[in-house]
Image (cartoon, rainbow, N blue to C red):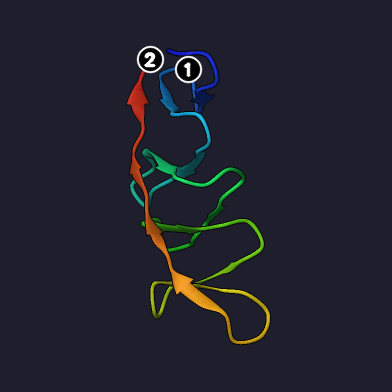
Amino acid sequence: MHTGNIRCSSYFYCPAANTCCKTLTGQWGCCPYILGQCCKDGKHCCERGYECDVTFSSCKKKGFLSIPAQLKRKALLL
């Protein structure tokens, strides 16, 4: 494991500048944002300050700003 990586558990980690999120199956996934917001659908995540809109797979901020939600990537084995 390289310096700066994010440890999710005793066995899994995500690259630096990612956030560990659980998938619906209980596995670890990596959100490509620092302090990312893990969506309840277990597949997507949003940048900090945005709320997940799982119906449209998007991330919304107060007002009308909406951006696509990012798919999580599989966490890596230590």
The residue positioned 38% from the left and 15% from the top of the image is 78
Q: In screen coordinates, is 64 left or right of 45?
A: right
Q: Position of residue 11 (x, y in %)?
A: 41, 18
Query: Residue at label 2?
Result: 78
Q: Nearer the viewer, residue 72 or 33?
A: 33
Q: Number of marks in the image?
A: 2
The residue positioned 59% from the left and 87% from the top of the image is 64
> Splitting the image into 4 quarters, where does residue 74 fall?
top left
| Dot placed on the residue nearer the N-terminal end, 1 or 2 | 1
**Residue type highlighted by circle 2:** Leu
**Residue type highlighted by circle 1:** Ser
Q: In screen coordinates, is 73 left or right of 33?
A: left
User: Residue 10 got which mark?
Assistant: 1
Q: Tell me whether circle 1 and circle 2 mark residues in contact (CB < 8 Å).
A: yes
Mark 2 residue element: loop
The residue positioned 33% from the left and 43% from the top of the image is 73
Mark 1 residue element: loop
